[in-house]
Image (tube, coloured by chain):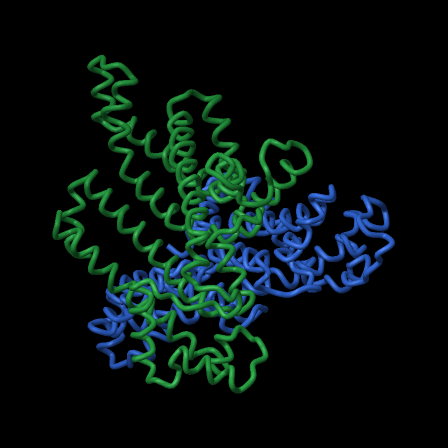
């Protein structure tokens, strides 16, 4: 299972979603994160990449609410700048894998027969590659950076989304309205595009929203390993890794703050997604 | 049973074969000359590149190359790393034990602590249940790298019970060094298995045969052992198996975070330096480990619950 790495997230989120106040809080956090990301360039108190070696490892103060890192860069500003870069990758992953997975699933369910069998077999084989291993292998070929891990993870997420969508498309295809349209002489392409896909869209949105949290953890892991965005990018996963030597020196702020940002974002988005799924 | 195992084995071999083809073929999807890729991005003279072409037989047709690579891997001739300047077999051999011990350690934590805490939460009363539930909720939200950071923070600056860096030498020292990596690796999975165990044991305790056994006056402990746990074992084993299979990929994070020299950190380091000879072999090894563990879990499940042998007919 490709998601195994992050699979533990599903349950507490579902549990929390049953509590009203928790999901309201999670929605509020999601809105806040989106607002911060949209207005990031205007609300950062300092330039996130401004180096000030004389002021390295500053503690909490009015000028630097979260202190500064090993190069004297303002941590709050870097966290805010990271709210743009860090969720961008996972967003792309779910878009790419959502489109590819749905296209594969709907065509497999519609055409059926040998095509369906072949698609299912390919998906099974893709499942044997743990997402992280696939992403690391692809970065070895194409070099570290933003593109390679995103493409690799999109590939790893295709079977996960495609399996769910294929089952749903098969169910949908068996409904009487599809046969009715066919009898009226509409083409398969028309029925899929105008009727099947709109009916599958809500499920796709929910599945993609749930996958977003997993994709975010996977991409943050890759950044943490140094195979994603490269310094001096303000990316949460990268900040966690770069702050690690400072922990031993007694300055854990950078790693802890960035780790908290990842966990809060993932939990908030997952709770909201589970809430949507429960409806 | 033999037919069941045979089918699983055949499916597994097919998957591994296709995976090996994809892993080797990916070299030709990458931009640039395979010879300079194999050199790991080093600046090479044309003579040196020609030597690499000859050494890796890059002028042969693709299928011949693939076959040579695959048969080499199967017979233990893994090639030489051009970045580490060492045979790949030696690189892997020196690190294999550490990673296997790490995965075994994490598996024992997941199965031991996860299952036990799940059972305690299910039958140990309200306070135990609340304590386990709160702890697992926190642990489940923490990915491996976050768990690693928090453990390093606690054990490097506040407590010094465990070393936060290196792999150690000798068995006892190695276990001592691998404690924190194993904890970071297993934290999320452990909580997940604990949750599943709690839910399964509860459901099983409430089922009719368990209630009937209790009503006949059989002791609670005996009902738990004989009737409840056996029924709960199947789903718990299935989930644990998936998590243990996932551990192999997770070693990359745990080893890298704690500076442990194992296969996971070797994969990350050789990927960062684009050492494709090493990456290909390691990726194949990790896929094999993943697939083999998954198969063992399927077989173990079938042994526990022979009904699966019949329903497994289709797959």
In terms of image quadrants, where is residue B63?
Answer: bottom left
Asked whether A141 or B188 is in front, the reply is: A141
**Residue B34: x percent and y percent?**
46, 80
Asked whether B84 or A20 is in front, the reply is: B84
Residue drawn at x 30%, y 18% as measured from the top left: B221
**Residue B288: x percent and y percent?**
33, 57
Residue drawn at x 16%, y 41% as measured from the top left: B306
Does residue A48 appear to the left or right of B290 in the view shown? Answer: right
**Residue A8: x percent and y percent?**
45, 45
Does residue A170 appear to the left or right of B130 in the view shown? Answer: left
Residue A24 seen in the figure? no
Does residue A181 appear to the left or right of B77 in the view shown? Answer: left
Residue drawn at x 21%, y 26% as measured from the top left: B209
**Residue A90: x percent and y percent?**
54, 62
Asked if B233 appears above or below B213 in the picture, the reply is below
Asked whether B254 or B140 is in front, the reply is: B254
Chain B's shade in the image?
green
Residue drawn at x 21%, y 38% as measured from the top left: B304
In terms of image quadrants, where is residue A89?
Answer: bottom right
Count of numbered circles on the image? 0
Q: Where does the N terminus of chain A fall, quadrant-wise?
A: bottom left
Residue B305 seen in the figure? yes
Chain A's shade in the image?
blue
Residue at the farthest top position: B217
In terms of image quadrants, where is residue A118?
Answer: bottom left
């Amino acid at each position: 299972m490709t998601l195994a790495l992050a699979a533990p997230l599903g349950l507490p989120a579902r549990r929390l979603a049953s509590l009203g106040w928790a999901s309201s809080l999670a929605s509020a956090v999601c809105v806040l994160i989106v607002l911060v990301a949209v207005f990031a360039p205007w609300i950062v108190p300092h330039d996130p990449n401004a180096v000030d070696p004389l002021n390295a490892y500053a503690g909490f103060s009015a000028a630097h609410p979260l202190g500064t890192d090993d190069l004297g860069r303002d941590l709050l500003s870097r966290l805010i700048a990271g709210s743009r870069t860090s969720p961008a990758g996972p967003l792309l992953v779910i878009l790419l894998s959502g489109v590819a997975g749905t296209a594969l699933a709907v065509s497999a369910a519609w055409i059926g027969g040998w095509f369906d069998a072949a698609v299912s077999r390919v998906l099974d084989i893709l499942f044997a590659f743990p997402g992280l291993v696939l992403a690391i292998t692809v970065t070895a070929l194409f070099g570290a950076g933003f593109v390679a891990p995103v493409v690799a993870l999109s590939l790893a997420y295709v079977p996960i989304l495609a399996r769910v969508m294929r089952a749903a498309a098969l169910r949908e295809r068996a409904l009487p309205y599809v046969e009715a349209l066919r009898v009226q002489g509409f083409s398969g392409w028309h029925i899929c595009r105008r009727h099947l896909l709109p009916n599958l869209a809500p499920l796709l949105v929910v599945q993609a929203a749930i996958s977003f949290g997993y994709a975010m953890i996977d991409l943050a892991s890759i950044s943490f390993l140094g195979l994603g965005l490269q310094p001096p990018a303000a990316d949460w996963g990268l900040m966690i890794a770069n702050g690690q030597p400072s922990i031993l020196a007694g300055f854990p702020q950078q790693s802890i703050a960035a780790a908290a940002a990842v966990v809060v974002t993932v939990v908030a988005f997952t709770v909201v997604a589970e809430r949507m799924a429960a409806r | 049973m033999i037919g069941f195992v045979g089918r699983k084995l055949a499916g597994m071999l097919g998957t591994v074969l296709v995976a090996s083809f994809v892993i080797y073929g990916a070299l030709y999807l990458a931009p640039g000359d395979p010879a300079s890729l194999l050199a790991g991005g080093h600046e090479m003279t044309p003579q040196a590149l020609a030597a690499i072409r000859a050494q890796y037989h890059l002028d042969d047709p693709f299928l011949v190359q693939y076959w040579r690579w695959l048969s080499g891997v199967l017979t233990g001739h893994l090639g030489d790393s051009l970045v580490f300047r060492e045979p790949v077999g030696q690189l892997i051999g020196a690190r294999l034990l550490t990673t296997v011990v790490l995965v075994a350690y994490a598996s024992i934590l997941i199965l031991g602590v996860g299952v036990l805490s799940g059972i305690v939460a299910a039958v140990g009363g309200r306070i135990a249940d609340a304590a386990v539930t709160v702890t697992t909720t926190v642990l489940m939200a923490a990915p491996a790298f976050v768990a690693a950071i928090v453990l390093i923070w606690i054990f490097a600056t506040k407590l010094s019970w465990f070393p936060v860096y290196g792999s150690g030498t000798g068995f006892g020292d190695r276990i001592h060094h691998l404690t924190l990596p194993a904890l970071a690796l297993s934290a999320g999975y452990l909580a997940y298995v604990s949750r599943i165990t709690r839910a399964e044991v509860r459901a099983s305790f409430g089922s009719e045969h368990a209630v009937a056994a209790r009503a006949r006056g059989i002791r609670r402990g005996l009902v738990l052992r004989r009737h409840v746990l056996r029924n709960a074992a199947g789903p718990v084993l299935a989930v644990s198996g998936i998590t243990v299979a996932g551990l192999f990929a997770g070693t990359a994070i745990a080893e890298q975070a704690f500076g442990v020299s194992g296969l996971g950190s070797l994969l990350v380091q050789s990927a960062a330096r684009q050492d494709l000879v090493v990456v290909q072999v390691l990726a194949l090894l990790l896929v094999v480990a993943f697939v083999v563990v998954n198969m063992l879990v399927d077989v173990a499940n079938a042994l526990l619950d022979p009904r699966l042998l019949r329903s497994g007919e289709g797959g």
